[in-house]
Amino acid sequence: AGGIRSAGTRTGWQGNMRRWSNSTGRWSNSMGQQSNNMGQRGYSTGQKVGVLMMNMGGPRTQDDVGPFLRGIFADRDILKLPLQDILGKFIAWRRVDQIKQQYAQIGGGSPIERWTRAQGDGMVKLLDRASPATAPHRYYVGFRYTEPSIRQAVENMLNDGIDHVIAFTQYQQYSGSTTGSNLNELWRVQHQLDPDARLRWSFIDRWGTHPELIGAFADRAEAQVRLLPDHVRHTAPILFSAHSLPLNVVDRGDPYVAEVGGTVAYVVNELRRRGVTNPYRLTWQSAVGPQRWLGPQTEAAIKSYGTRGFTALVAVPIAFTSDHIETLYELDIEYGEVAAEAGITHYMRAEALNDYPPFIAALASIVHEHITDGFPASTQLLLPDPGPESPQTALTRQWIAAQ
């Protein structure tokens, strides 16, 4: 991506949506300006455009926790276990009561669907104003392990007469275990429900360094730093916390670790521009199961800094954009208790982006840029990992390349 650049002005959500041009090295207004190159990937005027917002999902109720966990532990894009059908179900069974208790402490279920719909509502309102040639835009929520499912979303798009679908991952950093898993499921569903390929597809597969996203993350982190007492405000470590990965996924060349690191670098650069000079580290959370996972773990880092005399710390969820169990329970409750026991008296957690207006504007800008650039294919998405690749992933990549 070249040198790290500033996230620039933060007024885009008020109507002056701006984009960075790699060719000119300048900011320009993008929302409201329609490009002439929209035919590059088969779009023609009058076609109905839908935006599929893909994510893992989360259980709506306590009764959904078991099926949610079984889906995760059966997915070989996340974990490859011996006798997976048996061992995966066993791990899910062992964890279900514990996870139900955790959800009970954050309201009984995951709020991720509510936040995704709020994001989608705001996004399409901005898109309709910015890209009238492709309006009205509709968004569809497609979760990997819970309802509303990817299958349900594709069924709805076919019933609604959508012509072109932008598959927009809500994981801003790409991993084969997250976006890749969603795309593999999308391939299966699409081939079952739309064998004649009535739907045309394009893909937004990663967006972790988009300037408006970086600005929104920096806003959330800076707000917590500014709340710290004067004597620790400039020395409190910032822990950028992301969901961990099994090391065998990292070893095959999955780009997630590098892309999360890229997001952190851009956010830190923006914080430095604003005068926030706190030291920082990237840490990893939510490891589960018998395999070795990427570290250092966020919990261990909190304990370590507490024992070294730090009394203030800011945790920033950098791979999550919506509140769910990893933020509301793990970071807030579980790690809050860890911090208190370690002697950290000022443990701060940056708010998730949720329905923050600059973040909604970022989503709209990302889709609008995809439209005005002619629905481009991602060269990164078409490049396989250096390590072993599943036959399903190869099929999915071939399908994407053919769109």
Image: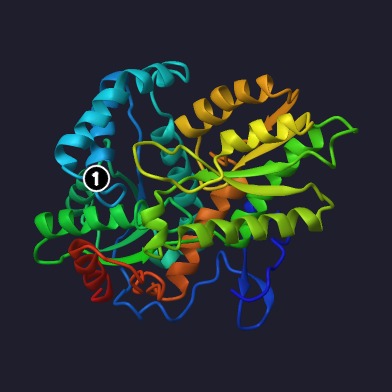
Where 230 sits versus 100, above or below?
below
Where 308 sits versus 11, above or below?
above
Q: Nearer the viewer, residue 357 or 324?
A: 324
Point 61% across, 78% down: residue: 22
Left/right of residue 271 with respect to residue 295 in the rendered view: right
Point 41% across, 45% down: residue: 292
Left/right of residue 143 with respect to residue 89 in the rendered view: right
The image quadrant where one finds the C terminus is: bottom left
Q: How many marks?
A: 1
Quadrant in the rendering for residue 72: top left
Quadrant in the rendering for residue 205: bottom left
Point 50% across, 57% down: residue: 257
Q: Amino acid at mark 1?
A: Leu
Residue 166: % across, % down: 34, 61
The image quadrant where one finds the N terminus is: bottom right
**Crowd class of label 1 (few under 14; some 14 to 19; many from 20; radius 10 Å):** some
- Can you see residue 45? yes
- Can you see residue 324? no
* Color scheme of the displayed model: rainbow
Where 239 sits versus 19, above or below?
above
Point 44% across, 18% down: residue: 107
Residue 197: % across, % down: 15, 66
Left/right of residue 374 with respect to residue 328 in the rendered view: left
Residue 162: % across, % down: 25, 58
Left/right of residue 2 with respect to residue 270 in the rendered view: left
Residue 273: % across, % down: 80, 58
Secondary structure of the residue carrying tag 1 is: loop
Q: Which residue is mark 1?
A: 81
Q: Nearer the viewer, residue 42 or 175?
A: 175
